[in-house]
Image (spheres, grey):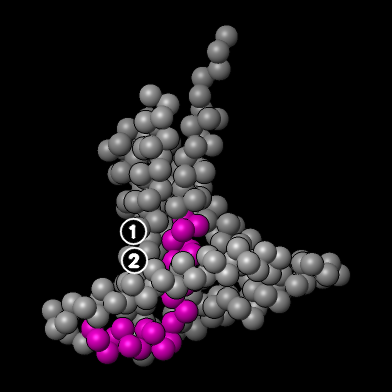
Amino acid sequence: MAGLAWLRRLAVAIGIGGASYAIMLGIMVASIVYDRELEPVIALAFDTGRSIVSAFDSLVSGWPWGQVAVNHLRERVNMTHVVLSIPAIIIASFVVGIPLNRLLGGTRTAAQRIVVALLSVPATIVLAVALFSFSALIPGAYASLLRFADWVWQASLNVLSGSGDAIPGVRKLTNAARQGFSGHHYVILALCSMLASFLVNALFALASRPRKA
């Protein structure tokens, strides 16, 4: 039974990760198709991302390794895409995570499922920012992760492009995405949402487990 419980949590995590990535792709499509209409949203995401980096910069002032991490975050990570990914993670956690948790027999009450979803969102952001910030300390492992993420991103674009004329303008859209998007960040955010959901679900289950007398 314990093994099945872990499989259920893994299934929920995969569902959230896959759904959040699909929604991120939808956000990417919308930002290209409706670039003028969404310009204020993109500008807000850019300013928010810059504010996050500035806040971390102030936080690690005087700490050499921390400064290296923040510089890496500033120079190598598209924080605009990271910020734009947050709505996708929120939607996936609630629209997919809660029903899937219920369907697979996860946490018992609706309130518990909502708490898990609420905690999964900040947990995802913390994991992602920590990974992006301190990846400078583990360049080899991070390079492997980037290669995998880029492979997933390119495969996603190839699937979209391969749909031919079924979706009007899809080839032009995917070409624009290849030129203007660091899509591996979307993939990494989706992976972080999977890991965060799994950890929060598991920790919640362990914390709510009745103690033996």
Relative image position of residue 76 (x, y in whole percent): 61, 78
Residue 63 vertical position relative to residue 97 in the rendered view, above or below? below
In the picture shown, does residue 178 fall above or below 109? below
Residue 63 visible to an observer of this rendering: yes
Tell me the SS state at disc 2.
Answer: helix
- In terms of image quadrants, where is residue 11? top left
Tell me the residue at 55%/17% (across/down).
211
Asked if the magenta segment contains residue 129, the reply would be no
**What segment is highlighted magenta in the picture?**
170-193
**Residue 55 visible in the picture:** no
Q: Position of residue 118 (x, y in %)?
A: 47, 49
Image quadrant containing the C terminus: top right
In the rendered image, the vertical position of residue 56 relative to residue 103, given as above or below: below
Residue 67 locus on image (x, y percent): 77, 72
On whether residue 192 falls in the magenta region, the answer is yes
Q: Are marks 1 and 2 in contact (CB under 8 Å)?
A: yes
- The Cα atoms of the two marked residues, 1 and 2, are separated by 6 Å
Residue where numbered disc 1 is placed: 19
Residue 151: give x, y in percent of width and height: 41, 71
**Which residue is tagged 2?**
23
Query: Left or right: 135 with respect to 171?
Result: right
